Image (cartoon, rainbow, N blue to C red):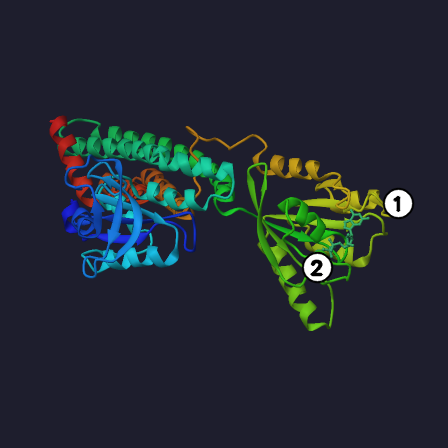
Amino acid sequence: VLTTTEFDTIAAISTPPGEGGISIVRISGEEAFDVAKKLYRGKNLDKVASNTINYGHIVDPDTHEEIDEVMLSVMRAPHTYTKEDIIEINCHGGIVATNRILQLILSHGARMAEPGEFTKRAFLNGRIDLSQSEAVMDLIEAKTDRSMKAAISQLDGNLSHLIKHLRKDILDVLAQVEVNIDYPEYDDVETMTSKLLREKATDVHARIDQLLETAKQGKILRDGLATSIIGRPNVGKSSLLNHLLHEDKAIVTDVPGTTRDVLEEYANVRGVPLKLVDTAGIRETTDKVEKIGVDRSRKAIDSADLVLLVLNASEALTDEDRQLIQATDKKQRIVILNKTDLPVKLDVDEVKRLTKPSNIISTSAIKADGLKGLEEIIAKMFFGEGIANSQNDVVVTNARHIGLLNQAKQALEDVIKGLDEGMPVDLVQIDMTRCWDFLGEITGDSYQDELIDQLFSQFCLGK
Ligand code: GDP
Ligand code: ZN
């Protein structure tokens, strides 16, 4: 077990780079107070209570130059973010002063922290587990209120809690199997043990499946729903994009095909983060610049979870439109009939026939008509019934967790297969233990030692 004393003292500027009203320099570790005492002129830090904020100045001890007027937060181990002593210096937000304070800290006993190192310490010092540490990052990067809720739930340990339950159930059965193996003189031990393993494997398998069912939506919440707006030049893609973003991020022009830069922006559609990609549309063209756009547009279709196919309702359907309908046929798609403020010349029945069973919606980007309806369709398509199958609001959002859950599931399938084929119980046990290990990697538990300790304690109780 690692203890805080094995770590050196680290420091970093914890507020975003650049000028601001206030900047915070954070120090964590055994020497945090000693370092601060060398630089801080104000109250006696040995005497101030934990979790207080104290007025004073930062002074260069070598030159006696006053660097900044500060408020200094004092947090004593172990009830801190890292479980170590923490000092946070709130200084005036200037870049120069903030950097000088950091430099002074670094030349008086602290080391520059690596990215994420404060959170890493929270993990290594046992305050949060691995999945909770990952949730901290997700929380920082959350794009919508829904994403944030998923991250907070994970940070609160709801996922960890479920995983720990699954692992405990597996350990219990493994311990029982050990006990059974120890009493081979009993009749039917083998049948009993197989039955036990099969029941538990089936049960845990079903619970993992339930978790995995939330993963698709979870991934959307965390990484965004890759959404491509596809359509011929000038049908109104950029205008629609602007509405979805609720601000003027894309360049809208009157010249066909001039949206050359592939834009990537997040839009918040009723809590669903859409990662929007605007493209120049699929066209056969000799124009070199345009061609990049076309290639990217094909790529944009491939990588999209959702395609918004825009057609110009004020013109008849063209061959290019038909090509685009075909190119997006395999995708989750919403067909947008734009420019409906103008006289409609599009054969809507033909479009319906060609794009079935996709959702179709009429809009006028210029009059902002039909956009609420579009947002409604998107939200319904992906979060119609809320989060699928969630147990206590748990949503699996992280690709690493998804991978490990799938591996754990596979190991359980191996257990069941082994039992079906009459494999010896000690071999089946290995697959069950593998499942336990995979789940442990989600929470970052040190599995080998724990397994032995746990088995031993259970074993004694059983005897
Ligand atoms: P894009 O090339 O597909 O991205 O199309 P833009 O969004 O750049 O729009 C091309 C032109 O069509 C611009 O002049 C827009 O003002 C206009 N436009 C976009 N949406 C509508 C609409 O719903 N109705 C009308 N009448 N014009 C529109
Ligand atoms: Zn455009």
Where is the N terminus found, in terms of image quarters? top left
User: Helix or strand or loop: what does disc 2 sit on?
Assistant: loop
User: Which residue occupies the foreground of this view, 371 or 323?
Assistant: 371
**Callout in the foreground (2, 1):** 1
Q: Quadrant of ligand 2?
A: bottom right
Q: In the rendered structure, find residue 343 and report the number of the disc placed on it.
A: 1
User: Which residue occupies the foreground of this view, 356 or 305?
Assistant: 305
Return the x and y of residue 221 as percentages of the image width and height: 50, 41
* Residue that carries the numbered disc 2 in the rendered image: 281
Return the x and y of residue 241 as percentages of the image width and height: 66, 49
Q: Is residue 386 above or below residue 236?
A: above
Q: For the point 27% across and 59% down, which residue is it?
A: 103
**Amino acid found under the numbered disc labelled 2:** Gly
**Amino acid found under the numbered disc labelled 1:** Pro
Mark 2 CB lies closer than 8 A to ligand 1? yes
Mark 1 CB lies closer than 8 A to ligand 1? no
